[in-house]
Image (cartoon, helix red, strand yellow):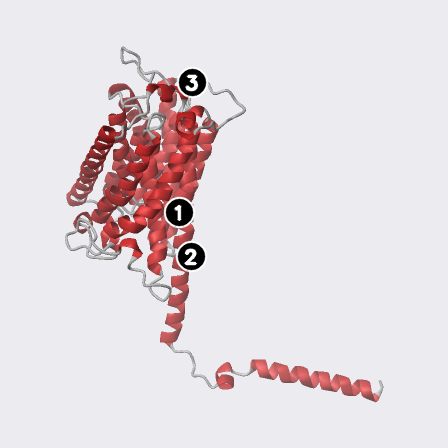
Amino acid sequence: MDRPESIKKIVSLSLLIAVFLVFSVNPVWATNKPAPTPEANKAAIDLVQTHANYMWTLVAAALVFFMQAGFAMVEAGFTRAKNAINIMMKNMMDFSIGSLVFWAIGFGLMFGTTRNGFFGTSDFFLSGWDGPHGDQWILAFWMFQVVFAGTAATIVSGAMAERTKFTAYLIYSVFICGLIYPVFGSWAWGGLFNGGGWLEKLGFIDFAGSTVVHSVGAWCALAGAIILGPRTGKYSPKGEVRAIPGHNIPLAALGVFILWLGWFGFNPGSTTAADCSIAMIFVNTNQAAAAGALSAMILSWILFKKPEIGMTLNGALAGLVAITAGCANVTPTSAIIIGLIAGLLVVLSVLFIDHKLKIDDPVGAVSVHGVCGAWGTLAAGLFNIGGTTSKIVLTQLIGIGACFAWAFGTALILFKITDMIIGLRVSPEEELEGLDLAEHGGHAYNDFQVIN
């Protein structure tokens, strides 16, 4: 080996040793900084947890937002092709209008400072957020809550489908997101930021909204369906029920699967924390839906001699609605029981409302979200992991009753006034023609003939 080559190797080796020594030296000595303290380590860990909470809450909000698509697909599939555009427009606008109204009024009424336990009086127009250097959590929390408000609003769309004036529906969207939903939400959930609502102080259990979200929407839907009356041709002059089949059951099934997916944001996301508690909530949510679908299918098979798809799909949704209240405080076994009962209830309720009460609910929204929401809220007390008492059960019943009185009562007044001023229902000619053409000037399926 020649001398210059040897020198190069010696120099290279020396440099490698020097680099190793530099990077292996204790960084505390190298930077003259004190060693991390337990307090500093805790602060760093807390910051990571905070960032994870933000991320999980916003991801969950996105999943719940996707439920709007699920509702749109279910409602469109269960109704006729001539009204599909109208269904899409209502789902689009109740969330769009709802977002603005909930920002301006609803969030403040629901989570603003309250001294009376009935509604908030601050944080309107997101005034609690003090700019980019203020509390950013209020933005993340608002985003998660506004998609819940949208869910409550869109439940009504299906029950009032195929005969409601579009302008009347827009008016309703303003009031449910700006007043009806937020006020009851303040009663049950207002203590997240303030002194707490009166139901919350009683110990009312509704973790993710079987009553707060789903029953509120359902009881509003019931009021609207009553004021509207049934679709033309739904009942014979003798009162016999005439089936009006939906135009696209695969679309409705896709909607149910989308909703099932979205519920993994709806229930676990209500922790607003990225921690291990979401695991049980995920499992409970899934098992209740599966059990609801199974029991609804079996009962429909017994009653109709065939496993009926519409009832089965609604059975899955019934299980999801029912477990929403108690998803964080019941065991997976209890979740299955809750779902099984919900699946049976939804079939019986749909038949009772349709055949006995003669109320036309094209998608079964009142049964799925109202009846099964009430059952799930009661079940949250009956199957409570910490044990149940007569006080817990009574509190759950009070909450269920208060929700019905408030939501149904205010919606009945709202729809009645709307009907008196601008009319709630389209003309018979427009209903026969289809709301797509009458209200929106188009057809959802331009290459196909729409049969009335």
Image-based side of 443 in relation to 96, left or right: right
Answer with the quarter of the image where residue 276 lies. bottom left
CA–CA distance between discs 1 and 2?
12 Å
Residue 232 in the image: above or below residue 321: above
Residue 420 appears at what percent x and percent y?
Answer: 22, 29
Residue underneath mark 1 = 265
Q: Does the image show residue 372?
A: yes
Crowd class of label 3 (few under 14; some 14 to 19; many from 20; radius 10 Å): few
Crowd class of label 2 (few under 14; some 14 to 19; many from 20; radius 10 Å): some
Looking at the image, is mark 3 or mark 2 nearer the viewer? 3
Q: Quadrant of the C terminus?
A: top left
Answer with the quarter of the image where residue 169 lies. top left
Upstream in the sequence, badge 1 or badge 2?
Answer: 2
Query: Which label is found at residue 55?
Result: 2
Residue 368 in the image: above or below residue 67: above
**Residue at the right extreme of this rendering:** 2
Image-based side of 65 in relation to 210, left or right: right
Q: Quadrant of the N terminus?
A: bottom right
* Residues at discs 1 and 3 in contact (Cβ within 8 Å): no
Residue underneath mark 3 = 452
* Residues at discs 3 and 2 in contact (Cβ within 8 Å): no
Looking at the rendered structure, the kind of residue marked 1 is Gly
Image-based side of 277 in relation to 182, left or right: right
Residue 428 appears at what percent x and percent y?
Answer: 33, 19
At x 29% / y 41%, what residue is drawn? 174
Residue 12 in the image: above or below residue 63: below
Upstream in the sequence, badge 1 or badge 3?
Answer: 1
